Amino acid sequence: GRIVLMDFIIKIENPKNWNSREDWNSYYDAIIANGNFYQQNYGGATGFRFGQYVEDWKTEGKKKIWVAGCGVSMLPKLLEKCGFEVYATDFSETAIAFQKSIDDEILKNIALKMYGWDFPPEIAKNSIRGGRLICEVQDFLYPYKESYFDLILNIRSLQRFDFPTIKTIASRYFDALKPHGHAQFEMINVNVEFSDSVKKILIDAGFVIPEYTLNRCSLEALMESVKEAKKAADPQETKETLAERRNHLFQKFFDKKKRKNQRKIEFEASQMLNPKVKTADVRFGS
């Protein structure tokens, strides 16, 4: 049917059951009917970072990209315009039908409504011939094109699943990547504990997450230093000496944790040099 772009934003709630194809079809039907494409396209890889991501991926030699759980995002079409071989998949037949219907006019209208672009400037800058877009109904809980992709993008299509399901998804993504491929996850409205749990699941699946160990080491050292500083607090202590003592404690605990984790850090560094390594990161959308 005709694509309607509304002048105001109508909030459409995500399906409560993320495993229901019927609920997802109804959700995307409502988005298309109300023209609320902002809900699927703001921030992250589809927003102001798009141009930088494209430059980085081209520099890194990324060619084949899987946009898993693509919904009605315009990201797959934008990536095709930039010359990538793109596979857009979703659990919902409605979402895939929409992806297949996107033409240049729809893309321009959505971009104009959302960003004020006459056409995304990154397209004019990066557009080359050779791009290809394949849209398929696919449940990413099941295997898909083993060792085929350079890059997998999951934009806010993971965070409502339970951990056993995320574990299965991580395994499927790992198998679908080529050696030295990368999986990028964007999430929104999740806490640190959930994010850390997802990272641990990805590591268990075989991914290397750069700097993860060192970041955890820093966080643990900071928490211990704060606890120690509180225990030894002197009511008469000035702000300057308190800050100095906390810095000293932080450095002491950081050095201790760094030594303790040195072997693991060195192992991850060596893994990054391994030509068969597969990496991942978890980012927060904006």
Image (tube, grey):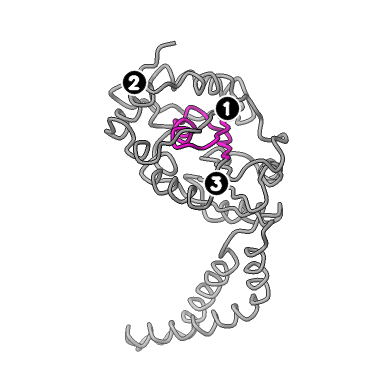
Q: Which residue is mark 1?
A: 134
Mark 2 / mark 3, whichever is N-terminal:
2
Residue 178 is tagged as none
Query: In the structure shown, which secondary structural element does the residue marked by tag 3 occupy?
Result: loop
Magenta includes 79?
A: yes
Amino acid identity at mark 3: Lys
Q: Tell me where the magenta segment starts and ends, as one range.
A: 64-88
At label 1, the amino acid type is Ile
- Residue 90 screen position, x and y as percent: 59, 28
Query: Residue at coordinates 56% horizontally, 70% vertically from top-left?
Result: 214
Q: Nearer the viewer, residue 107 or 220?
A: 107
Quick check: marks 2 and 3 in contact, CB under 8 Å?
no
Label 1: which secondary element = strand
| Front residue of this view, candidates 80 and 271 | 80
As displayed, is residue 239 above or below residue 205?
Answer: below
Q: Residues within 10 Å of mark 1 (few under 14, many from 20)?
A: some
Percent across and percent down for residue 46 are 42, 39
| Marked residue nearer the N-terminal end (1 or 2) | 2
The label shown at residue 62 is: 3
Report if residue 139 lies within the magenta region: no
What type is the residue that disc 2 sits on? Leu
Residue 203 at x, y = what percent?
Answer: 67, 56
**Marks 2, 3: nearer the viewer:** 3
Secondary structure under tag 2 reads loop
Real-space CA distance between mark 2 and mark 3, rounded to the nearest whole angstrom: 33 Å
Counting other residues with Cα less than 10 Å from the Cα at mark 3, is it few (<14), some (14-19), or many (20 or more)?
some
- The quarter of the rendered structure image containing the N terminus is top left
- Snapshot quadrant of residue 32: top left
Nearer-N-terminus badge (3/1): 3
Q: Which residue is mark 2?
A: 5
